[in-house]
Image (cartoon, rainbow, N blue to C red):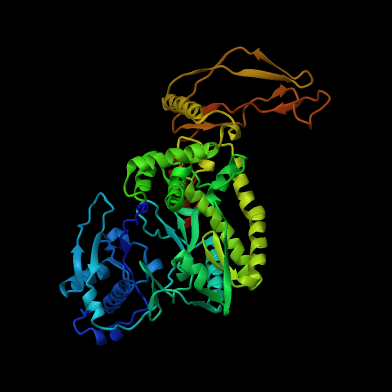
Amino acid sequence: MHNVSNPEIPRDRALPFFTSADFEHMAAVLDDMPRFRSKSMNRAAAAILAGMDHHVRMQKTNWISYARAKSHYTGKGMYFGDDYTYSNVVTVVDALAEAGYLSEHERMPPSPRGTGIQSRFIPNAEKFQSVRLPRFRKPTGALIRIRDRGTREMIPYVMNERIDREWKWTARLNEAIADMDIAFSGGIRRDGDVCYFENSAVDLSQQSLYRVFNDNLTLGGRFYGAWWMSVPKLERRQFISIDGQITSEEDYSNQHPKFLYYLVGETLVGDAYDIGEKYRGEWRDPIKRALNILINAKSYSEAVGATAQHVNGSYAVARDIIERLKARHAPISHFFHSDLGVKLQNVDSQMCRKILDTLVIRKGIPCLSVHDSFIVREGDRQILLDTMQEVIENTANPVLDKLKDSKTSSVSVLHNPLSSRSVLPCSSRGGASDSESESESESESKRNRKTIQNRKTSGAKKTITTQNHTVDQCAGLDTQEKRPEKVMEDIRDFRTSIDTANAPERTVAPFSDDCRHDTQVKERPKAAWQPRKTTVPELIREEERRRDARRNGKHTRTGRE
């Protein structure tokens, strides 16, 4: 059978900025390295060159993108350091292009409309392969990151109590990982800490983790950064050892589909990726990707286009797979292409955090995570399985119950308030439908707008009818007695105020628990609108006269004294 799975089109890589690079060490090796008057710009040049060298060593062929718009660099110092500025990056990249360090360079002028298309370049590999630059480790950077889902750019944020707590916990986890004896014996060849495979490479010096959220702290939140996350699955399960012992890897199978079945109160039976005899064998990986795409996509057309990339670009095959998946998972098909996946990622990230906290932080058992998969020593396998089951019951199920029991609207389950379709099943929804609630809110908004416009009329005379409502508590009936209409002037301008001191009292029937045995209580009616005795400007001038009198040590009689 032909190869049904195509590798993804490589996405442009964000500009690697190695803040640990030293300018003088690199300038000693590169004779034609551009020099600048500013020390900050020299440090930026070293950081960019070190990142380009690492890019070449990792045998990456994709483009490196960077921005030529000043707005992109606002607040990014918290992620890349103080030297990551518009003037530094743009000036250094242009100088490197003139010096021949770039084989291709596409400059995109900044657009006031913000098209989102950035400038990009490809490093000249010959420049870096002809010399051996000092090796600088890629910095971990911010341990908590928030990324814009649309532009995929990092969003600056203000540190709060929750972020500070998660930051400190992640730092503590990285310290524990640094003390582990982790070894890898796989790969085709080595170049220092870089291990090469058939179609990829990993840097074995990168052991620190960081968390990436999407738009806010309730979406995403998975762990990234460690080298074992990029190792091919077969290599990872065979050639990783901890403390000199062989390891065992356990994962949550069919995790997101099981989450969705849990939301509708059903159980997934069989393999979630089995959609018939036609799509078995080597089709499993494309089917798995297609199901994940269906859960994460925002629309049907987006799901078809993304799925087609994994089946040799065939849209007909992509549509057939999607329709088969919908038939296979009919109970949860209304969740498909509803943009719910990023919310489920937040659930599995909480589960991953709980497992790492229990094993690594609390019990001191070495454990490596790959999203929903975990690697431990063979002797700790049963402890891992028990912990994973406890996390399902104590962490995942309560979070999913909150989603399942929510009866307000799709906003409470989905993060996207613009979604007009609830992801909850019909049996879980309460009250009116979304369209009914929208029409009711719209009509109410029109009524309120009309009321406000009527109140803006200044100096008009209106007739107000007051009604007395008598409540019979024992019989449980509401009776209504009309009182004679009372005509009064309603003058609503800046001279109008509420005078409740002179409002007459009226007797009403008791209706609270504190009022029993037909006890009569006094209640003040709603305040009547009456004109002010003085205007606001007069009050201001009066206060200014008092202030001046106090300053001068005199007592001035005002109009109200």
Q: Would residue 283 be found to the left or right of residue 374 on screen?
A: left
Q: Would residue 426 be found to the left or right of residue 316 on screen?
A: right
Q: Would residue 53 be found to the left or right of residue 98 on screen?
A: right
Q: Quadrant of residue 22?
A: bottom left
Q: Is residue 97 above or below residue 418?
A: below
The answer, for residue 545, to whether it is visible in the render is no
Q: Position of residue 522 (x, y in %)?
A: 72, 27
Q: Position of residue 58 (x, y in %)?
A: 34, 72
Q: Position of residue 18 (x, y in %)?
A: 35, 74
Q: Position of residue 418 (x, y in %)?
A: 43, 39
Considering depth in this image, is 55 or 245 the residue closer to the camera? 245
Q: Is residue 204 above or below residue 334?
A: below
User: Residue at (41%, 79%) from the top-left corner?
Assistant: 193
Work out which residue is located at the far right of the displayed protein and give it.
Answer: 517
Q: How many marks overall?
A: 0
Q: Quadrant of residue 101?
A: bottom left
Considering depth in this image, is 251 or 284 the residue closer to the camera? 284
Considering depth in this image, is 545 or 151 the residue closer to the camera? 151
Work out which residue is located at the far front of the displayed protein and give it.
Answer: 1
The answer, for residue 54, to whether it is visible in the render is yes
Q: Is residue 480 above or below residue 29?
A: above
Work out which residue is located at the far left of the displayed protein and give it.
Answer: 98
User: Residue at (25%, 49%) from the top-left corner?
Assistant: 113
Q: Quadrant of residue 407?
A: top right
